[in-house]
Amino acid sequence: METKEIFASLLQLGEDWQVDSISYDKSFTRVDIYISYTKDTGFCTNTGELSPVYDYRKERVWQHLSLFQYKTFLHCRIPRIKNSLDKVSSIEIPWAEPLKRYSFLFEKYVIDLLKATFNQTKTASLANTTFDVVNRIMHSSVERGMLRRTFKKGEVVLLGIDEKAFNKGHDYISILIDLDNQRIIDVERGRDKKATEKLITKSLSKEQRADIKAISMDMWESYMLIAEKLLPSADIVHDKFHIIKYLKDAVNNERKKEVKDEDILKKSKYTMLKNERNLTSKQYTQFEDIMAANLKTGQAWSLAETFKEVLDSKEPVQAIAYFDMWIDKVKDSGLKAMQKVAGTFKNHMEGIINYVVHKITNAKTERFNGKIQNLKNIARGYRTYKNFRSAILFFNGKLDLYSHKFQ
C-alpha cells in the first residue's frame, strides 16, 4: 500500500476522497496533507438528491491530530453541487463539521485533554494549538451537549438551587442541580426573581417541572417565590447546612458580645463553631471550661445543638413538636441573637419541616461550588459570564460532548 493510500485509510475518507500529496516544511514542525474529491456528482445536503458537481470552493485548511510531534493540517477544495432547484451548496465532508477549522478527531482530542487538565491554556499547549481554538471547542461542545440532552419521564425529581459569586461585589450566578443524578442542569447570571425564573424555565419544560417533588435551597426569597410559581408539585426544602450555619452565626454573635467581659472566651471562635467531636484536646478543654462557666455563649451553643433534634426527627409531627418546644426555650432564654434566628426559622417553618420529609440537602451543591471554585482558581478567574457558564457545564453537566461520528 502506498503512503497516500495509508493516510487515506487512516483518515477514514472512504471511496469519494483521496490523498493527493503529503508535504512537510524543512524545519520539521508541520505536516500538510492535501485531499481531493474523486467523483463528479455528490449528494445535496438540503434535498438529499444526487447532483452534478458545479464548482469547487477555495482551499480550506483544518487542523488535525499531530503526526508524531508535528502539527498536522488537512487541505481541500470542497466541491459544490447544483440541485434540481438550481440551488448551489457544498457537499458534506467526512472529517469535519461545516464552518469548523479543525477535524472531528482533533476536537475529540482537545475535549479529552480538557477533561484531564481542567485548563484551557495547558490543553492548547499539549494539543499544539491556540487558546482561542480550545475555547471555541469548549463552547461548541457544550452547546451541542445541551441541544442533545433530554430528560426521560421521572428522571429529574429532586432539585437543588444555590448561588455562587462570579465577580467581586454583588455579581452572582444561580446554579440548578439535579440531585439524584449529581449534575448541574444549567446556570444563569443573577439571583433575583427574573434570573431564577429564566433558569428554571429554560432548563425544564412545563411537563418536566410538574414532575419535581422537592427543591432544596437556602431562605433566599427570590428562589422561594419562583419555585412556588413554577414548580407546583414541589416542596421547598430548606437546606440543613444553611440552617446550621444560621445557628452557628447566632452562637458566634453571642460570643462576640460576651467576649469583652469574659476572658475565657478569647480565641474561642473555632472552639464554639466546630463540631464537638472534631475539637483538638486543647480546644476541648477550653470548651468544657466555657460550658462550666454557664455563659450566654454556652447557652446559645446548647440551644443550637438542641435544634438538631428537629432535623433528626423521623416524622414531620415529631419535628413540629420539637420545633415548638425549641421556640419556647429560645424565647425564655433572653438571648437576642438566638431569638432573631428563631424568628427567621418560624417564618420558614414549612421548608424546615420539609427537610424531615425528603431528607435532601445542598451538600452536593456545595461540592459543585467547590469544583466551580477550583475552576476559577485554575483559570485565575473568568472575564466573561459566557466562558464561566461553558466551563461549569463542560466539567459538571454530564453532557454528551463529542461528535456522534466518534462515539
Image (cartoon, helix red, strand yellow):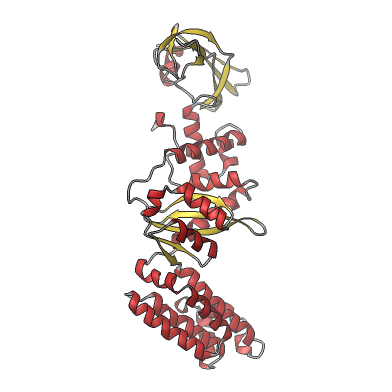
Task: Classify residue 173 as left or right of residue 161.
Answer: right
User: Going 44% across and 21% down the picture, which residue do you hit?
Assistant: 94
* Rendered position, 255 above or below 85: below
Q: Residue at x 46, y 41 (%)?
A: 146
Q: Quadrant of the N terminus?
A: top left
Q: Position of residue 159 (x, y in %)?
A: 42, 57
Vertical arrangement, residue 376 with respect to residue 240, above or below: above
The image position of residue 209, as x and y in percent, is 40, 52
Residue placed farthest to the bottom in the image?
293
Establish if 129 lies above or below 168.
Answer: above
Q: Is residue 262 left or right of residue 153?
A: right
Measured as percent of width and height from the top left, residue 342 is found at 51, 80
Which corner quadrant holds the C terminus? top left
Residue 289 in view in this figure: no
Q: Is residue 52 above or below residue 32?
A: above
Q: Nearer the viewer, residue 94 or 147?
A: 147
| Residue 4 can be seen in this image | yes
In the foreground, 272 or 150: 150
